[in-house]
Image: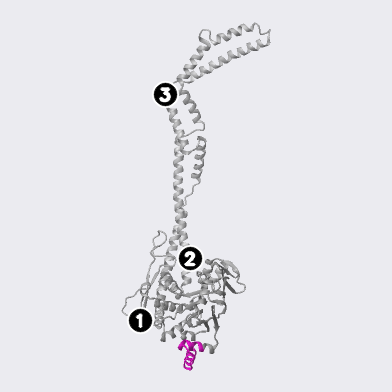
């Protein structure tokens, strides 16, 4: 709850310091006195947008700060403090805003700069601005379900259900992932087995392709090779003056002189080597002649085999050696493959058990909600009838969620809040058919309906500061007093800041602030004063009659004493 508010250079406020207490704090004053500036300052501190004209003096920045009590029983609040590593040793939370002359702002919590998003999270927990936007939440079926659970004290039960639901959701996601993985692995193993069968059908051998390529070359050129071999043998041995004969003749001629000269001796030796090499070459050529043959069927086989091996290499983008290594690798994966079907079956059985339990819990939660809805509806009707809607009727209509998770039988009609979608139906007048709240309710009815809900739920919610900014618009007579009682009742559990023109609400205040705008020659300034009992009576008299006549003062005293 807010304890202190300080404002510098803000709209028409040069310097303002206020202290608030628990209970109902009422702010009154003439129209245009600047009452809403206080609410506006709190709004800006807690993340509302900054508009032009917000600085009283455009040459210097504005500084705004709100100090809040730390409610250690508010778990959401404490968790948010811990999550953002905010020191709470002093049991107070300082939220401040600095607005520069360029209207750019900085936000701080306990002296540490924080983002606007973080500020807005604290706003949700610390404050409740009873505004037109707040009233729009009544159209939201999720919000309607939330307030019903708060009324029925089912929030913890719902949270337990949500936790179980999310666990089930995670299991279903895991199951689907396992099923997908199992399917992918099975397809992968199927592919591997196909590839192994394909490779083993061809039975490639390391180096086979090179050997076949050489043999193909020989067979392709067999006729040319044999013709060359025959001509070579004729040139060396068979024709007249053959190469062999010529070399032999010169060997014979030079042998006579080999002992006379060392060079001649070497020449004879080389010629004999040449003759021997010619013999060897002819022998090798004859070997080729014995081996090679013009065999079209063999050539056709080799070409076919090479085509198979080449196609295999192209397909797998590997040479023969690498293909055989790949085959061994995928064979090992096939050998080590373990199906996940057993794990899938176990998880599926577990999900079915969880599903049965969660449907049971959803049914139990739904039954409690329907019981609570009847009581809640009666309380709302009782309260809003007091707020000048005497013929109001409402009904909580229940339906099931349309979307659900998974493809399991029995998942339909469930979501993370249970098996209920509710819609409040409303009628303000006799004989008028009940219709969805978003269709049937006017702005004034919305405001009173929300006020009734806040009053009913006030002792079930974490303590916070609730701000009512001129909620009394268009209300008078007996309804004014009932409205004052409503707001005062809310103030028993929460701190309430209420800007009001109604003397009845002012008479119920635990603390009364008077707001006055003082106009100077060049500027105006807002003055805020905490009223004592006598001053309070004078202010309520002014609100009653516009003056502090004796009769007005007596009436004011009656209102105060009637509280």
Give x and y (percent) for residue 307: 44, 32
Tell me the residue at 44%/43% (across/down). Answer: 191
Residue visible at 32% across and 80% down? 430
Q: Earlier in the sequence, mark 3 or mark 2?
A: 2
**Helix, strand, or loop for circle 1?**
loop
Above or below residue 367? Residue 300 is: above
Residue picked out by circle 3: 296
What label does residue 163 carry, if any?
2
Judge whether residue 66 can be spotted in this image: no
Q: Residues within 10 Å of mark 2 (few under 14, many from 20)?
A: some
Magenta highlight on residue 545: yes
Q: Is residue 287 visible?
A: yes
Residue occupied by mark 1: 391
State which mark lies toward you, 2 or 1: 1
* Mark 1: few/some/many CA within 10 Å (<14, 14-19, 20+): some
Q: Which residues are magenta?
A: 537-563
Q: In this rendering, would 511 be left or right of 396?
A: right
Seen in the picture, residue 168 relative to 233 is either above or below; the reply is below
């Amino acid at each position: 709850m807010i304890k202190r508010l300080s404002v510098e250079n803000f709209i028409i406020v040069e310097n303002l310091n206020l202290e608030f207490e628990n209970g109902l704090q009422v702010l009154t004053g003439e129209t245009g006195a600047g009452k809403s500036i206080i609410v506006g300052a709190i709004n800006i501190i807690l993340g509302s947008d900054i508009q032009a004209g917000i600085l009283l003096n455009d040459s210097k920045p504005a500084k705004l700060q709100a100090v809040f009590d730390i409610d250690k029983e508010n778990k959401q609040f404490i968790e948010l403090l811990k999550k953002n590593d905010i020191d709470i040793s002093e049991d107070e939370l300082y939220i401040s805003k600095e607005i520069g002359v360029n209207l750019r702002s900085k936000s701080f919590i306990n002296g540490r700069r924080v983002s606007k998003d973080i500020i807005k999270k604290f706003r949700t927990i610390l404050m409740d601005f009873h505004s037109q936007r707040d009233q729009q939440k009544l159209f939201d079926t999720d919000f309607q379900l939330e307030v019903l659970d708060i009324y029925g004290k089912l929030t913890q039960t719902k949270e337990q259900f949500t936790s179980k639901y999310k666990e089930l959701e995670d299991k279903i996601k895991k199951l689907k992932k396992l099923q997908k993985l199992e399917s992918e692995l099975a397809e992968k193993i199927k592919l591997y087995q196909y590839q192994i069968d394909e490779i083993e059908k061809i039975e490639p051998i390391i180096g086979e392709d090179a050997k076949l390529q050489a043999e193909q070359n020989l067979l392709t050129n067999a006729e040319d090779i044999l013709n060359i071999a025959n001509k070579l043998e004729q040139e060396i041995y068979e024709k007249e003056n053959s190469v062999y004969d010529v070399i032999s003749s010169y060997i014979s001629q030079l042998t006579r002189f080999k002992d006379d000269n060392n060079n001649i001796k070497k020449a004879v030796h080389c010629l004999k080597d040449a003759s021997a090499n010619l013999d060897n070459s002819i022998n090798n050529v004859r070997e080729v002649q014995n081996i090679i043959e013009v065999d079209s069927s063999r050539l056709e086989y080799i070409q076919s085999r090479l085509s198979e091996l080449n196609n295999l290499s192209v397909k797998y983008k590997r040479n023969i050696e690498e293909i055989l290594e790949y085959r061994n690798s995928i064979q090992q994966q096939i050998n080590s493959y373990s199906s996940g079907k057993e794990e899938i079956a176990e998880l599926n059985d577990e999900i079915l058990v969880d599903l049965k339990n969660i449907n049971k819990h959803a049914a139990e939660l739904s039954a409690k909600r329907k019981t609570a809805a009847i009581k809640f509806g009666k309380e709302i009707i009782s309260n809003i009838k007091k707020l000048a809607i005497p013929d109001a009727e409402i009904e909580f209509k229940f339906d099931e969620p349309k979307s659900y998770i998974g493809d399991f039988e029995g998942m339909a009609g469930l979501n993370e809040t249970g098996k209920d979608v509710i819609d409040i139906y409303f009628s303000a007048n006799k004989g008028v058919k009940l219709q969805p709240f978003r269709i049937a309710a006017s702005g004034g009815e919305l405001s009173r309906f929300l006020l009734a809900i806040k009053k009913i739920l006030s002792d079930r919610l974490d303590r916070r500061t609730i701000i009512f900014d001129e909620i009394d618009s268009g209300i008078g007579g007996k309804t004014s007093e009932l409205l004052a009682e409503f707001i005062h009742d809310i103030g028993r559990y929460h701190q309430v800041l209420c800007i009001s023109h109604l003397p009845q609400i002012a008479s119920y205040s635990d603390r009364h602030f008077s707001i006055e705008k003082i106009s100077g020659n060049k500027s105006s300034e807002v003055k805020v004063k905490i009223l004592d009992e006598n001053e309070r009576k004078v202010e309520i008299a002014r609100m009653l009659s516009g003056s502090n006549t004796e009769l007005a003062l007596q009436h004011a005293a009656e209102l105060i004493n009637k509280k």
